[in-house]
Amino acid sequence: MTSTNDLEAILANLHNDEAIRVRIMLCFALLAFTFLGGSIWRIQVLKASEYRSSETRQSIRRVRRPAPRGRMFDRNGVLLAGNRPSYSIAVFVEELRQPGRISNTVARIATYLDEVGTTIGKAREVTHDEIAIHIRKRRPLPLLAWKDIDEVTLARWSESPRNFRGMDIYVEPVRVYPGAPIAGHTIGYVGRRDWDETDTPYHYYLPDIKGRAGIERTLDDRLSGKAGGRLVRVDASGFKYDEQVEIDPVPGEDVMLTIDVRIQRVVEDVLLGERGACVVMSPRNGDVLAIASAPAFDTTVLKNAARYKAAMQDAGRPMFNRAISGAYPPGSTFKPVVAIAALEAGLATAETMIDCPGYYAVGEARFNCWRTIGHGPLDMRRSLEQSCNTYFIDLGVQIGYERIFHMASALGFGRRTGLGLRGEVSGLMPDDAWKRKKYRDGWRKGDTCNASIGQGFVLASPLQMAVFVSTLANGGNVMRPRLFAEAGETAGEIVNKMNWDPDTLDVVRGGMLDVIHATTGTGRLAKIKHVRMAGKTGSAEYGPRSKRKKYAWMIVFAPVERPRYAIALVIENALSGGRTAAPRVQRIMERIFDIEQGIDVDLAEGGA
């Protein structure tokens, strides 16, 4: 039986054990509170800036803002290319991403857009496939769910009490061409700029535009400006609740072109319904006043994929810029080159007589003159007026092809002019080395005969021919053609100085004056009242022998006394230079001088 002392001892031991446990629990509690307090202090004080940065990184989105694109004006300040705001509803797909496969996100976005569409009164415009492609290829770009929305839709969006998660209104600058389709090949067009995820540390790249053709492409760096950026704060659900500007975009540079839109309209009107090209230059400084290719295209329809595809597949090749990319045999418009080469070499004079029986024979081969009964004896000026093939073939053989080749090369044939537009061809000024490489055959006398009348292998673009006739007009300065000039730059760039003898110029210019003003001149249909012009017609055959067609050429400069305009025009599938090209040049020149006199030009009359 337990004694009272033993019971008291047991109770004392239990009391001591309970006190120890309490003390232990208090120690554990103190340690826990100490650890908790230390953790809170570490999070809220020691690492506050680190967690604040992390929170900012997770809630802040950097959005790239494209700069307004620079405008284009003609030489008189007429707007050729500008911008207008287009309001679109954009979806930031990353904010609506769903776990699992991409199809889950696609389905969620499609359903969400259907819900939004009900609110704004517009059906969903993007398909499941388009959403999927966007997620795979352009995730950093916002998906433009509704493009170019009207004021009613914008108002419904703005006034809706609903919070649209992961969506925003995006104001997109849209390129507009007020005068379209005027100068479409030259001005060019734009497309969406490809984004580069390594370019800058932006989360989203708002759609930007890039020049794809013409001056839009050539001067893209100047026109694009410098993009800016903005910071957007989103919550855990992806809803945007705060925004602040980070960097304002710098607008692109405005550009003034050398084109005179009034002359450009005249030229395009005359070419309407044809396949061909025309270039109007200032022989004084190389300014391109008009440059046109027909058939043309309308830059405003290229935004539609179906219309763009149709234009690319059109048999008339409206997307092909014949003015700079077309390489044609120049025909008789090349004959002044042969005349100058002979005169400058001292191997011919103005009085050099050659008899034309209607052909030139090389062995059993015959090179026919256009006048099959022959011109009889001709001097050089008369041979230019009559465009006698026999005279220039004979002259070319006498002086040798090497002299013709070097004169033509010095004038710019066989190389690009340096206009600056993508797609410009160099043409072709062949020689013995070229022919051996191309055909494994040396240069022959028959090749010289063909080249002397601008046929055979010789090829030139309308732009090159405009540079050539400008050189004749200004007395021997080969000018680099230009479509835009820096501020204060008026003189132009001289590529080569020919330093021709004044007598040489008198003979060639005199023959070209007679081409238009003599009663028997081949270009007399180009004559206009009160202005003396000098020109040269030309025709060149092409196509299968059974279905031969002709290119019709004419080059002109005016006024003869102080030339201000130089023109090169070519028409495909034509009758001849005198019958097809000359009347069109007449209409162009007549209207140009009407413009000079302040007379309104009615483009509805006289078409092409």
Image (spheres, rainbow, N blue to C red):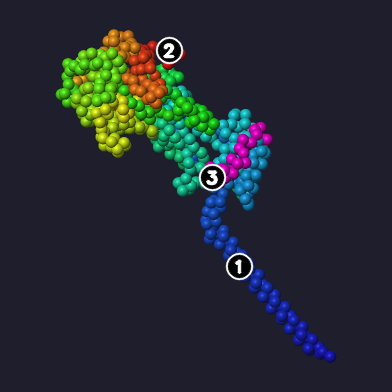
Q: Which of marks 1 and 3 is nearer the N terminus?
A: 1
Residue with the mark numbered 1 = 34
- Secondary structure of the residue carrying tag 2 is loop
Residue 592, given in percent of the width and then of the height, sits at: 36, 16
Magenta-colored span: 118-141
The foreground one among 197 and 242 is 197
Q: In this view, does 369 lie above or below 425?
A: above
Give, as a three-letter code, the residue at label 2.
Gly
Residue in view at x 21 percent, y 22 percent: 395
- Give residue 36's quadrant in the image: bottom right
The foreground one among 558 and 37 is 558
Residue 497, given in percent of the width and then of the height, sits at: 22, 28
Does the image show residue 110?
A: yes
- Give residue 127's quadrant in the image: top right
Give, as a three-letter code, the residue at label 1.
Thr
Query: Around disc 3, counting alpha carbons within 10 Å, would you say few (fewer than 14), some (14 to 19), or many (20 or more)?
Result: few
Residue in view at x 53 percent, y 51 percent: 57
In the drawing, does residue 532 fall left or right of residue 294?
left
Residue with the mark numbered 3 = 137
Give the quadrant of the N terminus.
bottom right
Looking at the image, the residue that sits furthest to the left is 346
Q: Nearer the viewer, mark 1 or mark 3?
A: 3
The foreground one among 437 and 559 is 437
Q: Which of marks 2 and 3 is nearer the N terminus?
A: 3
